[in-house]
Image: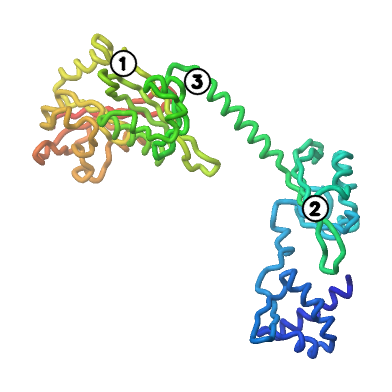
Amino acid sequence: MDNTHYYISRITEHLRENRGGLTISEISAGLSMSRNTISKYIEMMFLSGIVDVRSVGKAKIFSLSKRIPITTLLNYISSAVIQTDDSYVIRNANLSAADFLEMELNQLAGRNVLDLLTIQGLKQDIRTWIISSDRPMVFASDVELIRSERKRLIWLTVADVVMYDGTKGHFLVIEDVNDWKEAEESKNRYYKLFHALADETDERIFVMTPELMFTYVNPRYGVAHHRDPQSMIGENRLNFCDTHARHLISDAAGYVHTKGEPYRIIFPLQERDTVRWFDERLFPISDNGGEIREIIGFSRDITGFQEGGSAPVLLASLMDMLHEAVITTTPAGKVLSWNRGAELMTGYPRDELIGSTALSIITPELNAGRDLVQETCTGDEIRDLKAIIRARGGRKKRVFISTSRVSIQGGIVSGVCIVIREH
């Protein structure tokens, strides 16, 4: 082993002084060593990646490789890596191995790694299999060990190797996967709990990507569309709504994706020959990095509450009796309702404005760049602000504007109510 280190060190130093590369004959002459000796160690150095070779005619030119020796990287990886001889006596180990075995790095060399793992709880049958001549060259298994007085799940890999000098040895890679296992088990528990609850509820529940592609649909949603829920996976949410609702749903999902906040919309939906009303709440699902990966939706059929004589209908009738313009919007500014006063003040009929942006009327350009809807959602409500609106035909009107947030349980802002009075 010492001779190997001596010869490789001398050859390495000689090649470092001759960066253009040398033939075996040139190395032999420069170091006053036999060609056979140089050939033996150059082959070892080539196989280990220390030198590269290129051909110039019939001659082979050897030069130091520009690659980093892999052993220099071991202290920068989180897995414990241990090199042993054929009897599992430690020859080399990285810092993670010392941390895993709860010892100082300089105390590891010369210790039997299987003895150390047995102290940590390695079972005898696993140890017997590791040292068995019948096991494959690479063996991997999950084992339970004790670390810091706690039982942990460990992924252990043992590989048989041959050293540069031809002697046999082993490499052990040890990874603590206990946290990963617990996270997976927790994820599976919540996954099953969510599906159990979603399958039993009468509300339409779905999970979709930010691009509106379904990744989950509960049975109630499937029944509403006479489809097997599984057959809807991968389809676009917009395929199951009419033209009027399409842009509202798309804007709502876009808001949740970009803002990372819940969103609520109330909208009518044409289903076959019937118009039904839905109260839909969307919530972001983010990954560990905070990026929104999916959106979960709860869609409640509230058609019964929208029928004649209900409070919302009576309220809408009262709103139409007011001279003031009363507008409700989503947090993104899409118009949800538009009373008779708003029609008279702006000249726009409600059918033309529903679903469009309120900023086309209350334009930031005419109001010092202020987005009154966004200000209301994120800041204070507005009281009797002097403003300018744009009416039909490009006419400008001076008005007073007041706003208030519309919130659902938990303080989630679901919309904005805007009241406009003539100046």
The mark nearer the N terminus, 2 or 1, is 2
- Tell me the CA gap for discs 3 and 2: 48 Å
The mark nearer the N terminus, 3 or 2, is 2
Dot 3 crowding, Cα within 10 Å, few <14, some 14–19, many 20+: some
Which residue is rendered at x = 85% and y = 74% of the image?
A: 4
The mark nearer the N terminus, 3 or 1, is 3
In the foreground, 164 or 122: 164
Dot 2 crowding, Cα within 10 Å, few <14, some 14–19, many 20+: few
Q: Report the amino acid beneath label 3.
A: Asp
Q: Quadrant of residue 127?
A: top right
Provide the secondary structure element on which disc 1 rests.
Answer: helix
| Residue 303 badge | 1
Q: Report the amino acid beneath label 1.
A: Thr
**Residue 353 seen anywhere in this rendered image of the structure:** yes
Say which residue label 3 marks: 199
Q: Report the amino acid beneath label 2.
A: Met
Please identify the quadrant where the N terminus is shown. Answer: bottom right
Identify whether 387 is placed above or below 63. Answer: above
Q: Position of residue 371 (x, y in %)?
A: 27, 40
Judge depth for marks 3 and 1 and give the one in front: 3
Provide the secondary structure element on which disc 2 rests.
Answer: loop
| Residue 137 badge | 2
On the picture, is 169 further left or further right than 366? right
Q: Position of residue 40 (x, y in %)?
A: 82, 77
